[in-house]
Amino acid sequence: MANCVLNKDLLRSTTCAYNLLEVKDIYLANFADITSAHTDYNCESGVTLDSLVMESGASFYHIEPQKNSTTYTDELVVEDNGNKYRTQTITFTVAGKYDKDMVCSVDALALGRFFVVVKTANGDYLALGSQTGLEASAQSIAGGGDNNGVTVTLSANVAESAVPLGEAAINKVLGKE
């Protein structure tokens, strides 16, 4: 963040449109598999995560969350002493049968650290935890009611805002590179 001054108008007339912010897809990579995540921090042309480099053979894993179960936040935290940082959080539910094939995935989500990308219904991609990774802060397995499935919350205190992905980074996430 080269300098922290507002340099653009933020007007309803330039942002007024229908927006489908529902998260349709989540992509997770084991944080240790990301060797470089470069953000082009240019407030004039727009800030994007423009490149990702991963360990050889590593990939992103696709999660299709239960409809309308996913929320993410990127919140500013100001401590009493004036220190500032952000807390990024994503909560999602994976519906379906909890069986022998789910146990290892549930354990991995509970114990791992992840670089997270969300894709909205608008087709936008946003990176969470790109410099630090997100870890589970809550997880539950539910059955027998309206909320069947595995619900996971990943979060981390971070020093960077959530960042939209550029085309090259999106291609890397989708395995098109």
Image: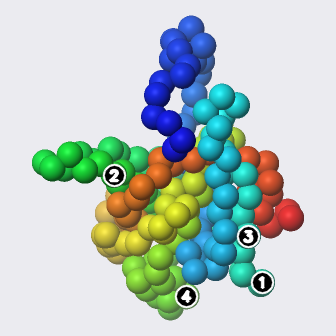
SS assignment at label 1: loop
Q: Earlier in the sequence, mark 3 or mark 2?
A: 3
How many neighbours does mark 3 have within 10 angstroms: few (below 14), some (14-19), or many (20 or more)? Answer: some
Identify the mark at residue 53; answer none if there is no mark. Answer: 3
Instruction: Report if residue 61 is visible in the image.
Output: no
Q: Which mark is residue 101?
A: 4
Disc with the residue nearer the chain's start (4 vs 3)? 3
Measured as percent of width and height from the top left, residue 31 is found at 56, 75
- Circle nearer the N terminus (4, 1): 1
State the image coordinates of residue 1 (x, y, percent, origin top left). 52, 44
Q: Which residue is mark 2?
A: 85
Q: Nearer the viewer, residue 44 or 19?
A: 44
User: Residue 167, relative to residue 46: is it above or below?
Assistant: below
Q: Name the quadrant containing residue 169.
A: bottom right
Q: Secondary structure at mark 2?
A: strand
Tags 4 and 3 touching, CB below 8 Å: no
Q: Amino acid at mark 3?
A: Val
